[in-house]
Image: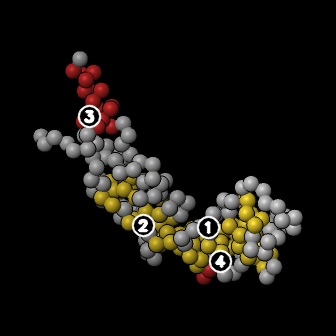
């Protein structure tokens, strides 16, 4: 009976914990648990990439560049739009580019790729690079010299939310 009760408390005390040590981040859906120098910390981004130093994190799909203090993503080529829409009708799930001739899906961004032609960058609210060939995820900057997209590293926060036996956030003093 004692073993069953102990297993019950341990199992239900850890359900919902987002970190291997049993601690959890404030919002399991929109944050990521990252290994820190001592224990774990929380990154305020979902499915984030945790940097090796345990202090910073980057959005999913990017990598940490601790030397430059940035999150890095390779430049994405901006493909040509597949069709010339001169009918003026807009279909559900797409938007018209500024030239009013081309359209991109709603989960992409129109980027100028020549003086009279738009392409669809595969990111919503993307940054169109000045070379008219590449684009970057939202919030980042085009670093054409290094052929990459840069974004400032995101600091993690110490994880003070520890899951105690019974699922409580404040552990009784022993």
Task: Say whether residue 169 is left or right of residue 16.
Answer: left
- Which residue is farthest left? 174
Q: Quadrant of residue 135?
A: bottom right
Q: Badge 2: how crowded within 10 Å, few (<14), some, or many (20+)?
A: many
Pointer 4 residue: 129
Q: Residue at x 45, y 48 (%)?
A: 29
Tag 3 secondary structure: helix
Q: Mark 3 sits on what residue?
A: 166
* 94 on left or right of 138: right
Q: Which residue is mark 1?
A: 125
**Real-space CA distance between mark 4 and mark 1, rounded to the nearest whole angstrom:** 13 Å
Residue at 38 percent across and 40 percent down: it is 16
| Local secondary structure at mark 2 | strand
Instruction: Tell me which label, 2 or 1, sits earlier in the chain.
Output: 1
Q: Tell me which numbered mark, 3 or 2, is placed earlier along the sequence.
A: 2
Residue at left offset 65%, top offset 77%: 129
* Structural distance between the alpha carbons of marks 3 and 2: 33 Å
Q: Secondary structure at mark 4?
A: loop
Q: Position of residue 15 (x, y in %)?
A: 36, 36
Instruction: Left or right? Give the position of 45 relative to 127.
Output: left
Residue nearest the viewer, comparing 146 with 119: 119
Image-quadrant location for residue 148: bottom right
Per the image, label 1 sits on a secondary structure element best described as loop
Between the C-alphas of marks 2 and 1, the distance is: 20 Å
Name the residue beneath numbered marker 2: 154
């Amino acid at each position: 009976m004692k073993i069953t009760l102990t297993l019950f408390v341990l199992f239900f005390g850890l359900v919902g914990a987002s970190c291997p040590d049993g601690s959890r981040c404030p919002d399991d859906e929109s944050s990521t648990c990252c290994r820190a120098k001592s224990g774990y910390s929380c990154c305020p981004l979902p499915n984030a990439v945790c940097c090796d130093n345990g202090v910073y994190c980057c959005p999913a799909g990017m990598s940490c560049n601790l030397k430059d203090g940035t999150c890095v993503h390779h430049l994405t080529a901006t493909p040509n739009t597949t069709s010339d829409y001169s009918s003026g009708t807009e279909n559900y799930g797409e938007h018209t580019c500024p030239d009013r001739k081309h359209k991109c899906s709603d989960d992409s961004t129109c980027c100028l790729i020549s003086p009279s032609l738009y392409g669809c960058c595969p990111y919503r609210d993307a940054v169109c690079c000045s070379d008219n060939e590449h684009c970057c995820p939202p919030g980042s900057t085009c670093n054409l010299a290094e052929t990459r997209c840069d974004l400032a590293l995101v600091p993690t926060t110490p994880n003070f939310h520890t899951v105690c036996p019974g699922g409580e956030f404040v552990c009784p003093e022993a």
